[in-house]
Image: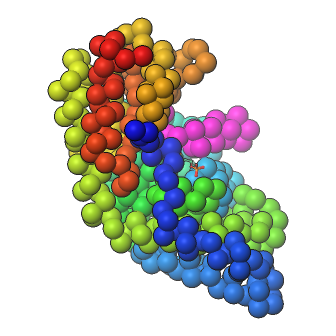
Amino acid sequence: MRVYLDNAATTPLDKEVFDAMAPFMLEHFGNPSSIHSHGREVRSAIEKARRTVATLLNTSPAEIFFTSGGTEADNAAIRCTCRAYGIKHAISTKLEHHAVLHTMDLLEKEEGVQVSYLRHDEYGNLDLEHLEELLANQPRTMVSIMHANNEIGNLNNIEAIGEICRKYDAVFHSDTVQTMGHYKHDIQALGANFLVGSAHKFHGPKGVGFLYCDANIKIQPLIQGGAQERNMRGGTENVYGIIGLAKALEIAYRDMEEHAKHIQGLKDRMIYKLREQMEDVSFNGLSEFGDKSLYTVLNVSLPASDINEMLLFSLDINKISASGGSACSSGANAGSHVLRALNASSDRGSVRFSFSKYNTEAEIDYAAEVLSKMYKKELA
Ligand code: PLP
């Protein structure tokens, strides 16, 4: 058995999505900027895809911009907003993805933006009173706080964060890469100024994503070039990627309830099996709590052992693909900045299992058994 439990890194492409994309690789190859019929048919497919995404998220197509993925969308939202409004104060968390953290570092170094990081406890619960303190008596601030953490799965209350941001007239960007396609986002109700999506996290193709940009926020493009994406992103569109993204999101919304139930069941089973078979197993962040973490992610904290160093390698030898990173900051695997920020013990091993609609109970049972046998030294 070969088991893929790294769906927070990327998900397999859905066949239905591939079928929607294929004609745009072979038959409908025109450049959407061309005015002839070959171009026009593709332009109209892109605009249909945009309407699909906008409708699912309860917003207007004019506020959806296709990008090369989540990283570009995060960069564009944060950097272009600070530039457009001359913002010199930003607030984020040390638990963000590098797409946000490294952007913050750059703003600090090159654009004189002062970046404040929210306090959190050892589970990663954010201190929203601190957010208010940081926002009070400040000129307009850029706030970037993710919806769900890709490593430990913690879900943040972005409705509450959005409300605080509105109270202080801050611009609010939320990295929604891990929740898009897994939870329903109602942009009208949310009140965030920017959200992002990345198709390969919800069974779409790699290298394509989107940025929702509130029409009240006026930014200049991150990528200069042609007039594509209504002058917001130069470069010929990734046509089949965009078609695939919209189809994948449509399927995700259509089948969400059924898949969420199935995947949550797998995660609960993994927690149960690990507790049953292993001593001293625990879970990083809030990942064991159903309502406080992604149903797709379980971050397991393992006892101190000499096998921790080779943990992912040993899983791989046993045909299990997962990912992780300890709290240790040295060595070839520089470890996890998220676990370090939580002050997780660097002696313990950590592995992130992340699940999709394609995983089965048999795969979960196999992975739990392999892991427990590894710690009992019954397996390589
Ligand atoms: N933000 C989060 C939370 C992610 O998990 C990822 C991908 O791992 C990204 C951003 C980057 O997305 P992409 O791979 O589309 O650039």
Q: How many marks?
A: 0
Residue 62 in magenta stretch: no
Residue for point 19% across, 34% down = 272
Most extreme residue toward the bottom is 37
> The N terminus appears in which quarter of the rendering?
top left
**9 and 174: which one is in front?**
9
What percent of the width, then of the height, locates residue 236? 77, 69
Residue for point 22% across, 42% down = 268
Residue for point 48% across, 59% down = 203
Magenta span dominant secondary structure: helix
Q: Does residue 367 appear in the picture of this structure?
A: yes
Q: Does residue 287 appear in the picture of this structure?
A: no
Answer left or right for 136 relative to 155.
right
> The C terminus appears in which quarter of the rendering?
top left
80, above or below 125, in the image: below
166, above or below 249, in the image: above
What percent of the width, then of the height, locates residue 165? 43, 54
Give, as a single range, the part of the protein colored magenta: 92-112
Residue for point 22% across, 40% down = 269
What percent of the width, then of the height, locates residue 10? 51, 48
186, above or below 84, in the image: below
321, above or below 56, in the image: above
What percent of the width, then of the height, locates residue 331? 59, 14
**272 and 148: which one is in front?**
272
